Image (cartoon, rainbow, N blue to C red):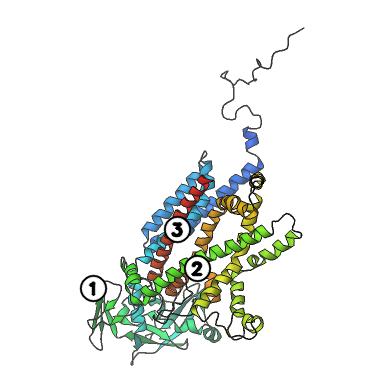
């Protein structure tokens, strides 16, 4: 009988190629890893989708780079080009599988986190605000435009208003019979007919777009001092000139009526010797001035100190109250003999399920001093100023935020309690420990190991909890020792919002960005310290 070969001695069969060597190279010995198998319909479809998407990205990049170069932003154009080239290399070159998965996440992180942080930091060192939002060239054009008056002996021009998408222009019949066309950005140029792609507006359309027609301010020539054409009825236009004459060589404005000269003061303004300035200005880098202003100006320094202290109290108090109530309810509703647990748990998490903004408005109505549900129904017609008194308003904010947040802590604590090992609890009972002793010495330390990172995140969230403050009190009642719209219940983020978007003193984006950087530093320091303590707690347990 022929002896059967041992499985140990058996060798895998290989197919020799023309050179006599086994063909177990690129595709290995697996018969499914063959070129014919690899180029299935799914593989071809994935390849087509990848190529199409990269093509779309490349096309958009070419357009974006062209626009950036046209505006003179060479740095941004270069960075965008390098990034897109890297993306193409990652997705077209084999062997870079981790990069293919990491690239989308890194891209969104760079756009929505890194860029925002760096751009906020840049704005913090500028004078960006109501009158300093653009470039110097835009400021010069705006100053001349806003100071123009109609020339008394201006000839009358017959005009036709033209429109292309959201752009408007004037087709002008000059007194000599020559046709010219221009827009707010393009000075008048001689033409033989209306430009292609532009539609003439009839009277009804002129009335419909009246605001846009009145805003037309077409330069007569490349020299902005020559004036502009304006129309009030869409049919006739007149020349308007400014009493401020701009000298491009000297970089000065001269008032032709008074002779007053305005020069660049280096701070983003044209300023005269008497201290008067022309508006608007332009955005320039001013260094640490915004940070110094926040800590030296009496109008903002003292309110900022009180708001910062209250922000810490609000964040810590809200976190503690939400956790305490959520943990209490989790322990109570986790009792093994309690019937109907699921119904009680549904009722407990209902406040957490409703939108915070809507809940804030509802509570604001319930706490109203004159007709609120709490004063009129629960307290029998009392007139307690829940939102008008500084201390009561702060208490109200804490209670409402506890109402909004305890459901989340209840869910977290319930999950953590149910994951605790029962043998440790049983060991405590066998040692004679009571329920409170077991909770304090066994359950709570183990609970903190799981919940501590979430408490840190909750503190950071409450530190920037804009919604509940703004919807409930809008930061009121206001402080009486400052002209800024800052109040007793404002936290730092609502104060930043009011400074940035006008809270009595106009919009100051530079100062608001500086305060945002301050918030970022504070939260980062608190988070680092807290996580170190959490790590120590984990090592201890």
Note whether 258 is above or below 53 in the view shown: below
Which quarter of the rendering shows the N terminus?
top right
Q: CA distance from mark 2 to mark 1?
A: 56 Å
* Residue lying at 58% horizontally and 51% vertically, measured from the top left: 441
Of the image marks 2 and 1, the number of the one nearer the N terminus: 1
Note whether 355 is above or below 178 in the view shown: above
> Which residue has dot 3 on it?
526
> Which residue has dot 2 on it?
314
* Left or right, 89 with reference to 43: left
Where is residue 256? Give x, y as percent.
Answer: 25, 86
Front-lying residue, 165 or 393: 393
Where is residue 216? Give x, y as percent.
Answer: 43, 81
Front-lying residue, 286 or 224: 286
* Left or right, 452 with reference to 339: left
> Which residue has dot 1 on it?
249
Return the mark for residue 69. Answer: none
Q: CA distance from mark 3 to mark 2?
A: 15 Å
Q: Secondary structure at mark 3?
A: helix
Q: CA distance from mark 1 to mark 3?
A: 53 Å
* Residue lying at 66% horizontally and 16% vertically, measured from the top left: 10
Where is residue 204? Give x, y as percent.
Answer: 55, 86
Of the image marks 1 and 3, the number of the one nearer the N terminus: 1
Q: Is residue 464 visible?
A: no
Where is residue 331? Give x, y as percent.
Answer: 65, 58
Front-lying residue, 541 or 376: 541
Q: Secondary structure at mark 2?
A: helix
Front-lying residue, 175 or 499: 499
Disc 3 packing (10 Å; few <14; some 14–19; many ≥20): few
Labels 1 and 3 touching (C-beta < 8 A): no
- Residue that lies at the very extreme toward the front in this rendered image: 432
């Amino acid at each position: 009988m022929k002896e059967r070969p041992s499985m140990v001695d058996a060798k895998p069969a290989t197919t020799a190629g023309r050179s006599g060597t086994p063909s177990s190279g690129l595709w290995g010995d697996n018969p499914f890893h063959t070129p014919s198998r690899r180029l299935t319909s799914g593989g071809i479809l994935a390849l087509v989708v990848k190529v199409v998407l990269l093509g779309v990205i490349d096309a958009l990049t070419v357009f974006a780079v062209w626009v950036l170069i046209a505006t003179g932003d060479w740095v941004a154009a270069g960075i965008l080009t390098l990034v897109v080239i890297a993306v193409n290399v990652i997705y077209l070159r084999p062997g870079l599988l981790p990069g293919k998965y990491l690239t989308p996440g890194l891209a969104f992180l760079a756009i929505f986190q890194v860029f925002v942080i760096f751009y906020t930091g840049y704005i913090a060192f500028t004078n960006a605000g109501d009158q300093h939002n653009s470039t110097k060239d835009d400021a010069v054009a705006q100053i001349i435009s806003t100071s123009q008056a109609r020339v008394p002996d201006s000839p009358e021009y017959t005009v036709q208003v033209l429109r292309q998408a959201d752009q408007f222009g004037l087709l002008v019949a000059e007194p000599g019979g020559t046709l010219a066309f221009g827009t707010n950005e393009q000075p008048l140029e001689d033409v033989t007919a209306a430009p292609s792609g532009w539609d003439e507006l009839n009277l009804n359309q002129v009335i419909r777009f009246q605001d846009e027609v009145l805003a037309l301010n077409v330069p007569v020539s490349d020299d902005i001092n020559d004036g502009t054409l304006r129309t009030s009825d869409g049919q006739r236009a007149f020349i308007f000139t400014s009493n401020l004459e701009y000298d491009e060589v000297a970089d000065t404005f001269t008032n032709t009526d008074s002779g007053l000269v305005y020069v660049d003061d280096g701070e983003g303004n044209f300023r005269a010797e008497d201290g008067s300035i022309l508006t608007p200005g332009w955005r320039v880098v001013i260094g640490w001035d915004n940070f110094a202003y926040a800590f030296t100006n009496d109008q903002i320094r003292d309110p900022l100190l009180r708001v910062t202290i209250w922000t810490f109290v609000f964040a810590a108090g809200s976190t503690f109250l939400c956790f305490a109530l959520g943990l209490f309810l989790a322990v109570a509703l986790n009792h093994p003999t309690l019937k109907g647990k699921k119904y009680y748990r549904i009722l407990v998490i209902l406040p957490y399920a409703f939108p915070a903004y809507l809940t804030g408005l509802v509570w604001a109505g319930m706490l109203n001093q004159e007709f609120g549900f709490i004063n009129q129904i629960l307290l029998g017609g009392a007139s307690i100023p829940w939102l008008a008194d500084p201390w009561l308003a702060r208490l109200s904010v804490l209670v409402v935020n506890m109402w909004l947040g305890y459901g989340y802590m209840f869910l977290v604590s319930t999950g953590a309690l149910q994951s605790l090992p029962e043998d440790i609890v049983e060991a405590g009972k066998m040692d004679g420990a009571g329920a409170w002793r077991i909770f304090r010495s066994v359950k709570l330390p183990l609970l903190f190991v799981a919940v501590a990172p979430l408490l840190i995140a909750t503190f950071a969230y409450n530190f920037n909890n804009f919604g509940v403050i703004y919807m409930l009190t809008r930061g009121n009642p206001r402080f009486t020792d400052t002209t800024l719209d800052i109040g007793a219940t404002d936290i730092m983020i609502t104060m930043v919002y009011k400074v940035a978007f006008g809270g009595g003193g106009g919009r100051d984006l530079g100062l608001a960005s500086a305060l945002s950087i301050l918030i970022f530093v504070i939260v980062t320091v608190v988070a680092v310290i807290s996580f170190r303590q959490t790590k120590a707690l984990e090592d201890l347990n």
